[in-house]
Image (cartoon, rainbow, N blue to C red):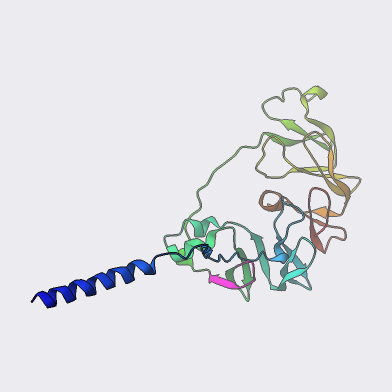
Amino acid sequence: MKKILSLLFALSLVINIGAQTKHVKKPGAKPVAKKTTVPKANPDLTKVNDSIPALIPQKKNGKFGFINQKGKVVIPHQYSNVGFYGEDCNLLNSKNDKAKKYGSDKYASVRLNGVDYRIDYTGKRVYKYQDSDLAKCPFEYKKQLFHAYNRQGYYGVIEDSKFENAEDYRHYQIYPQYEYLHIMEGDDLKNPMIIASYNNKFGVIDINNKVVIPFIYSDIKRNFSWKLARLFEVTTDGKNYFYVDDKNTAY
């Protein structure tokens, strides 16, 4: 019996010593660093202008695609209509969690053969719109501080809270001098962009009557491109529209 106990004790001692030696680090041994994989940045999405989207809609031969800020076609022209990459509040508020994620600004809405989809930055169609997935968008009304004012056939700008006397030029933010004015919707109510027409040409001015976009275009669309992407949709021939930023750089 004593021999058996002695043998068991010896075995347990060997096992314990062996287990301990497995964790002993060799002198001078360096810890192995874990490799971390960093996703490579897509060069097609490199921004030259940080204030506008990386990919911009473009129409060519009657179809829409997307170009990057350097003018390279990233997503082929195949759609009948597209929107900017941005949030879709109908999906963001969806009761379907699987659909909700496609409402983020990582996706854009497109239409192909009468069917609406969301695509990612590679152009892959990742979600097909379903009426049952769509929720109502919360409505938030923001009253404009400034409005266009017509005086004797010419347009100027007034600030509603300050305007009282149409005969006093001091009551105008911009005295009537333009053939047409349209105050664009944007996030900064105190400093809106204003589409103006002068000598039958369209341009953009700010609230201090400073020219932002020169009066060289035959038309500028009155849409949400400034609010959504800080871009203006312009044309020189009345047919072919393209985007320019607030430095009049064309895309």
Image coords of residue 142 (percent x, y)? 59, 39
Image position of 84 (left or right of 5): right
- Queried whether the magenta region covers residue 127, the answer comes back as yes
Q: In this view, does 114 lie above or below 48?
A: below
- Residue situated in front as seen by the camera: 55 or 170: 55
Residue 47 visible in the snapshot: yes
Image coords of residue 45 (percent x, y)? 70, 63
Image coords of residue 175 (percent x, y)? 83, 31
Q: How many marks?
A: 0
Q: Residue pushed farthest left?
A: 1
| Residue under the image location 91 percent in, 45 percent down | 199
Q: Quadrant of the C terminus?
A: bottom right
Image coords of residue 214 (percent x, y)? 88, 47
Image position of 143 (left or right of 51): left
- Queried whether the magenta region covers residue 241, the answer comes back as no
Q: Residue pushed farthest right?
A: 199
> Which residues are the magenta region?
120-128
- Residue situated in front as seen by the camera: 72 or 229: 72
- Residue situated in front as seen by the camera: 107 or 161: 107
Q: In which quarter of the image is the N terminus?
A: bottom left
Q: In this view, does 241 lie above or below 4?
A: above
- Residue situated in front as seen by the camera: 208 or 174: 208
Image position of 191 (left or right of 90): right
| Residue under the image location 72 percent in, 51 percent down | 50
| Residue under the image location 56 percent in, 64 percent down | 36
Residue 223 visible in the snapshot: no
| Residue under the image location 68 percent in, 71 percent down | 80
